[in-house]
Every structure is written in structure tokens, then in C-alpha cells.
Amino acid sequence: MRVLVTGGAGFLGSHLCDLLLNEGHEVIAMDNLITGNPDNIARHMSNPKFQFVHQDVSQFVYVEGNVDGILHFASPASPIDYLELPIQTLKVGALGTHNALGLAKAKGARIVLASSSEVYGDPLIHPQEESYWGNVNPIGPRGVYDEAKRFAEAMVMAYHRAHGVDTGIVRIFNTHGPRMRANDGRVVPTFIVQALAGEPMTVFGDGSQTRSFCYVTDLVRGIYKLLMSDEVNPVNIGNPTEMTIGKFAENVLELTESESSIVYKDLPQDDPKVRQPNIGRARQVLGWEPEVPLSEGLAHTVEYFKKVVAAK
């Protein structure tokens, strides 16, 4: 296959490029580098099966030749990013998705949208299954990301129903692993970098809110299975093992052997109190479930950030 990965220089996009190349496919990575990092894909630049295109998918998407698959992963994806880049976030969710779908229609390609567990908002059901419509504040500060993803899902389904485009939607839950940005504001890099630096670890709220952490290799394997399937409806991909943020902070302290203290700050507006995927559909239609335990994946992530911190 010849596969376009929008956001291909980002955290997840670059890992998808790795997997696709390892599976023998040709890859076109497209990124405007607003949050992506060319270092993430540097080792592929000499590979004849790999091509990088510096392009903003919100403006246009053009690829010469055939395209068999599209993984639309372009978007600011962390709270710091989409709060600093609210217009760009909305544009890539709307205009970028529209452009990617237009290319899929023109090329006869299967397209998989990177959606998010954020479409569930601050959920009123637990764990979250794909049939849940969500509890989202459309005018709150997080709404720019939540609603961008919800609109993108609606557009994907419209192209599928109106034009017969072969589409898929992956709802991604919290993921961690190498190539996360140290300053992107997500809990995993924030805790690890603070712990390694001996700085106080910042817990928002009382630490009782929960998250479920999936290691990146498990996640991209699930996304690849979705790309290779004919599943149209949204599929949750994430690790159903739930943990409080307070407990997660303790795990990071133990792994890093840090003496950092834990400080508590007010919970941001509309921050989800719980987050846990129901992965029954992924098991049923993709034969997928995570394999890497949190302790193992977190150890790999800590080792990566030790190098990042040492290089500063």
C-alpha cells in the first residue's frame, strides 16, 4: 500500500510511519511542523519508500500518484497546544479533515480519522463505550479540541454515506511512549520531567480523577488493524486499566527514584473526572487488545525522557 500520514512528524504519526514501513508499505508523511518534530522521522529520510511533505493540511492536501490509505492524524493534541492554538485546532479538525476526505474520495483510498476520547467530554457513563454521545461543553476552553474532533467524525460519516468513501474512526485514549514532547502539558511527560528534575510534581485537583494509559506500540498496532479492516463505526483504542492520577504520580516517583514532592492545584475547567475505554468493539472487530503492561511501558518512557533531560 501507499499510505499518507497527516501529522506524520508528530508523536503518534511518526510511530505509525515506523509501523507502516516495517510492514513493507510506502509512506508519505505530511506535516506543517507546528507541533511535529522532524527528528521523529529523520531516520527514514534516506528510505526510498518514505517521503516527507512540509504542508498544512488545513490549506490543501495534494499527493501525486496513487494513494491506498490515509491516516489523518494532523492536529494539536495536548491541552497546552490546543489552548495556545485554538483556531488552528478548529481549522485542522474541519478544513483539514475536509481536504483529507476529498483526497480519499479522489484516490479511492481508505481513510482513518484520529479522533479522541475527548469526544466523550466529562463523561456521565463509565467506562466509555462508542455508543455514548458524550458530555461536552462546546463553549469552554477545551471545546475547540472536543468539538473539532466531533465535527470531524460527523464529516467522515457524511462522506461515507454521501460519497461511499471507505472510512474508519479511531477514538484514542491516553497514550504514552518515546517522542512525546517534554513540555506538551500532558500528565505523563509533565510528571516524568518534573520527577527527573527534582521539581515538585503538579497534580490538578485532589488526584482522584482517573486515566487509562496505553503504550504507543499497542496503540499504533490497533490503528493499523483498523486501517486494514473495513470497519466504519468508531472504535475505542486504549488500555482499559484505570488508575487515579495520584497513584500514577506515585508510580512515576518510584520509577524515577525521585525525591520530588507532590503539589496540588485547582482542576482546570471541564477537565474529565474519569477516563476509561470499553474496548469490547476493538476486541470483537479487530481482534485487538493491549499487551504492554503499564509498568513496562512507563519504564521505556522514563528512559526516553532521561535522555531528553540530559540533552538540555
Image: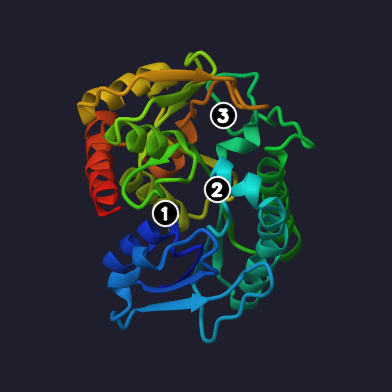
For mark 1, give the secondary structure: helix
* Residue 254 vs residue 312, the one in the foreground: 312
Residue for badge 3: 129
Measure how far apart labels 3 and 2 are at the Cα level: 21 Å
Disc 1 residue crowd, few under 14, some 14–19, many 20+, Cα 10 Å: many
Residue depicted at x 52% and y 26%: 275
State which mark lies toward you, 1 or 3.
1
Amino acid under disc 3: Glu
Disc 3 residue crowd, few under 14, some 14–19, many 20+, Cα 10 Å: many
Q: Residue furthest bottom?
A: 64
Residue 63, given in percent of the width and then of the height, sits at: 55, 81
In primary-sequence order, the first of circles 2 and 1 is: 1
Residue for badge 1: 11
Residue 244 in view: no
Residue 219, given in percent of the width and then of the height, sits at: 39, 45
Amino acid under disc 1: Phe
Q: Residue furthest right?
A: 139
Image marks 2 and 1: residues in contact by CB distance under 8 Å = yes
Residue depicted at x 35% and y 46%: 216
- On screen, residue 134 versus residue 288, left or right, reads right
Measure how far apart labels 2 and 1 are at the Cα level: 10 Å
Q: Is residue 274 above or below residue 290?
A: above
Q: Is residue 71 above or below residue 210?
A: below
Residue for badge 2: 77
Residue 268, given in percent of the width and then of the height, sits at: 62, 27
